[in-house]
Amino acid sequence: MTRPAGHVTAVPGLSRTAQLKALGNGVVPQQAVAALRQLAARQEPAAWQAEAA
């Protein structure tokens, strides 16, 4: 899920701080997916069955 070169840095008038903020916010969904996958891998099957009952 990478962005093309210049996706943020080629925007006229965008300060360095604004560029870093925009790039940082773009990582959040990717980090959330990684975290959820790790948590799901740790989940024990017995806990899933208890919720379904």
Image (cartoon, rainbow, N blue to C red):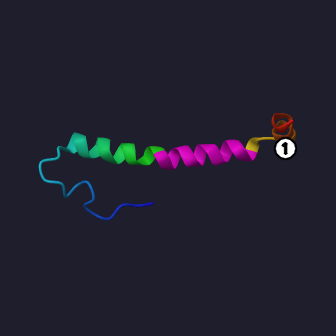
Could you tell me residue 52's position as x and y percent? 82, 38
Instruction: Name the outermost residue toward the front.
Output: 53
- Of residue 20 and residue 3, the one placed in the foreground of this image is 3
- Of residue 50 and residue 5, the one placed in the foreground of this image is 50
Residue 36 belongs to magenta span: yes
Is 50 on the left-hand or right-hand side of 40? right
Q: Residue at x 25, y 46 (%)?
A: 19
Is 38 on the left-hand or right-hand side of 26? right
Q: Is residue 13 above or below residue 5?
A: above
Residue 16 occupies quadrant: top left
- Of residue 53 and residue 15, the one placed in the foreground of this image is 53
- Tell me where the magenta segment starts and ends, as one range: 29-41
Q: Residue at x 66, y 46 (%)?
A: 38
**Amino acid on which disc 1 is placed:** Pro
Q: Is residue 2 above or below residue 26?
A: below
Could you tell me residue 11's position as x and y percent? 18, 54
Is 35 on the left-hand or right-hand side of 12? right
What kind of element bears circle 1?
A: helix
Is 43 on the left-hand or right-hand side of 33? right
Task: From the image, tell me which residue sits under label 1.
Answer: 45
Could you tell me residue 22's position as x and y percent? 31, 45
Q: Residue at x 87, y 39 (%)?
A: 46
Structural crowding at the residue carrying mark 1, measured as other residues with C-alpha within 10 Å and reported as few (<14), some (14–19) or many (≥20): few
Residue 47 belongs to magenta span: no
